[in-house]
Image: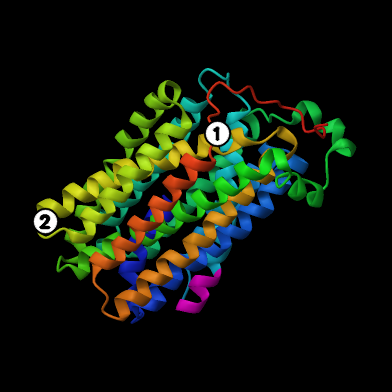
């Protein structure tokens, strides 16, 4: 919801603060810088202090930060707060998927993690609805204050979820240190998986944030009003949920590697079609397909990533991969802003994303290993 709302907020604040396309791109990129830092930092802390406490901490950081960003009186203050919000969100995502992957049976682990990630689409839908009805009528500040109410969910998490590391808290002295864990993800048994994840995460996040944070603004550039653009993006966003559900159904039948490569290939083709679309029917059709395939791929990637590592480095490995991905999230929105400022065609811009996603597909096919049915260990003691 936070990331989705940000794409609409960018379109709303641009005329209010007289922002250039480059400055608009920096709003998304600063958030991704924070997410990169948060993913690495909190992913490592989750291996050291447990998943549950870090999950609650990150939730509070990005919820409270969202409310504070509504009070920003200038562009500079806004992007500083968005960095902090990004840290919380970037840390929450890999920690949540790691916690859930360790808490369910192997036969349904992939499906459950993909369904967990489908709530990202639910958040996007809520963001689109709020942005369509609230921002034009009551301003973007009211929308962000409403988003900050998610902080209350921390009380529910505190008393209702089980930490997969609770039973091993007494083993703290046996847990490898941060430097040891970083070295471990590049040992021969992990290096191929780590390289694959870093490439895939970078390309997926680069293309996702480059395309989706700019969707409302791209629709405006194509000649549609802000209100109509919000409505059209809402329609495109609806396709995210079936994308997740189809991926969740296929992941325990075809395997993680096949489903991820297939959905990313669909994303690449849809991106090329969206960039070349002329007229509203083709824009909506390719935008819907883009949402369907891209978010199905996202859910599969979150299921696939923790399965590459043993418990002692699982949070660190997944967090680092997500952190590298966030570097792509920094480059994507900035690149689009720069290219639009230079009057580069949307066809070429989305062609770049087509190429980036194809690189991810090749990395999966060449370096990826199938992890369907793999039993995950749940102890953080060093593996010998």
Mark on residue 337? none
* Residue 208 point in image, percent of width and height: 39, 54
Q: Secondary structure at mark 1?
A: loop
Q: Looking at this view, is 69 or 214 the one in front?
A: 214
Residue 46 lies in the magenta stretch? no
Q: Residues within 10 Å of mark 1 (few under 14, many from 20)?
A: some
Residue 209: which quarter of the image?
Answer: bottom left
Residue at left 73%, top 41%?
47
Decide: is 25 above or below 50: below
Which residue bears the numbered disc 2? 280
* Residue 183 point in image, percent of width and height: 76, 49
Which residue bears the numbered disc 1? 369
Residue 79 lies in the magenta stretch? yes
Q: Main secondary structure of the magenta part?
A: helix
Q: Which residues are magenta?
A: 75-80
* Residue 243 point in image, percent of width and height: 32, 36
């Amino acid at each position: 919801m936070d990331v989705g709302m940000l794409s609409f907020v960018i379109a709303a604040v641009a005329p209010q603060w007289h922002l250039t396309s480059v400055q608009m791109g920096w709003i998304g990129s600063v958030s991704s810088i924070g997410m990169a830092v948060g993913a690495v930092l909190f992913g490592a802390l989750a291996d050291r202090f447990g998943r549950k406490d870090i999950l609650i901490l990150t939730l509070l950081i990005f919820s409270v930060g969202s409310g504070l960003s509504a009070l920003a009186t200038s562009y500079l203050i806004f992007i500083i707060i968005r960095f902090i919000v990004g840290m919380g969100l970037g840390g929450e995502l890999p920690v949540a998927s790691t916690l859930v992957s360790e808490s369910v049976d192997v036969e349904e682990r992939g499906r459950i993690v993909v369904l967990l990630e489908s709530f990202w689409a639910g958040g996007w839908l809520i963001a689109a609805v709020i942005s369509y009805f609230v921002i034009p009528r009551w301003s973007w500040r009211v929308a962000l204050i409403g988003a900050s109410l998610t902080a209350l969910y921390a009380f529910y998490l505190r008393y209702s979820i089980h930490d997969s590391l609770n039973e091993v808290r007494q083993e703290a002295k046996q847990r490898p240190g941060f430097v040891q864990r970083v070295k471990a993800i590049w040992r021969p048994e992990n290096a191929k998986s780590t390289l694959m994840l870093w490439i895939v995460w970078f390309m997926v996040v680069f293309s996702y944030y480059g395309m989706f944070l700019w969707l409302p603004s791209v629709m405006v550039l194509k000649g549609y009003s802000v209100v109509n653009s919000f409505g059209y993006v809402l329609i495109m966003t609806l396709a995210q949920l079936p994308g997740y559900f189809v991926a969740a159904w296929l992941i325990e039948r075809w395997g993680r590697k096949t489903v991820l490569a297939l959905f990313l290939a669909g994303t690449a083709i849809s991106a090329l079609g969206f960039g070349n679309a002329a007229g509203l029917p083709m824009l909506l059709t390719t935008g819907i397909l883009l949402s369907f395939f891209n978010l199905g791929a996202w859910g599969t990637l979150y299921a696939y990533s923790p399965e590459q590592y043993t418990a002692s480095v699982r949070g660190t490995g997944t967090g680092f991969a997500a952190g590298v991905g966030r570097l792509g999230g920094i480059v994507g929105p900035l690149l689009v802003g720069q290219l639009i400022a230079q009057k580069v065609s949307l066809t070429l811009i989305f062609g770049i994303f087509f190429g980036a996603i194809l690189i991810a597909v090749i990395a999966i096919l060449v370096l990826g290993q199938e992890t369907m049915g793999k039993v995950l260990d749940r102890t953080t003691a060093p593996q010998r």
